[in-house]
Image: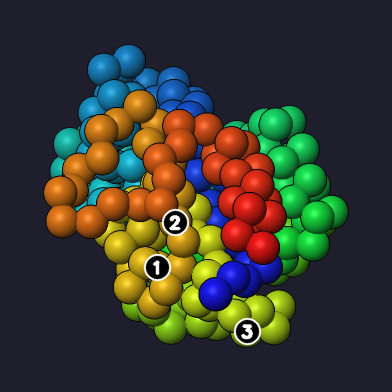
Amino acid sequence: MTSDLVMVDLDGTLLDRDAAFRRSVQRFVHVHRLGEPAAQWIMNLDDDGYTPRAQIADALTAEFPMLRPTDCWALLDEGGSEDIEISESVVAALNCIRAAGRHVVIVSNGPTAMQERKIHRTGLNAIVDGWVISQSEGISKPNPEIFRRSAAKVGAEVPGAWMIGDNAESDIRAAQLIGCRTSWISRGREWPHTDFQPTRVDDDVSDALLATERRSRAIQ
């Protein structure tokens, strides 16, 4: 079965969230005079955005007592969205597959306000068909219902759809369990599992996006 739906993760996939957050952290460290080693300490603590924000805020105020909780939450609520950028190649790939008739829906875990700031700031709102964000939905990846709601946004089928993401469990395994084809964005990493494999492994999300069109045409 084929589907014209392409679901794509946001942070670490369409957007380089870590690069943006690092720029925000470096500015935060400079403004509060925490010393240069503090920037890497915060990045390690953040763990690619997977550490709960409340845990980071508590650790920051414990490590740097001169910080006010409001200072920490200003950084964490902004989440790098001020510094986020999108590559021209990603924009071109999205335009290409949508022109070919694919429906693109962003599927993202995270706070709605932060994720929507990133979507609007980078212009993704104008070049995708919609987005589903965990906080708004009350469910998050790997719950399969979030993929079904993404498909419902554009009236598409889930079986045969593509899911592109950088998380092996919540993006790839979860989508494959409900019949999706998948592309894992490796970012130079080795695939971590032996019990299942993605349909594709791509280092570049632009290649992954364009491959959804080539593979769909080949199946048809």
Give the mark, 3 or 1, whose residue is nearer the N terminus: 3
Q: Secondary structure at mark 1?
A: helix
Residue 139 percent across, percent down from the top left: 40, 80
Residue 152 disc label: 3
- State left or right for residue 220 relative to residue 169: right
Q: Assess whether mark 2 and mark 3 are in contact (beta carbons under 8 angstroms).
A: no
Q: Nearer the viewer, mark 3 or mark 2?
A: 2
Give the mark, 1 or 2, whose residue is nearer the N terminus: 1
Q: Which residue is mark 2?
A: 182
Q: Assess whether mark 2 and mark 1 are in contact (beta carbons under 8 angstroms).
A: yes
User: Quadrant location of residue 171?
Assistant: bottom left
Q: Is residue 148 above or below residue 177?
A: below
In the foreground, 119 or 202? 202
> What amino acid is labelled 2 in the image?
Thr
Q: Is residue 197 above or below residue 192?
A: below
Residue 37 percent across, percent down from the top left: 26, 17
Report the number of discs. 3
Residue 121 percent across, percent down from the top left: 72, 47
Give the mark, 3 or 2, whose residue is nearer the N terminus: 3
> What amino acid is labelled 3 in the image?
Ala
Q: Assess whether mark 1 and mark 3 are in contact (beta carbons under 8 angstroms).
A: no
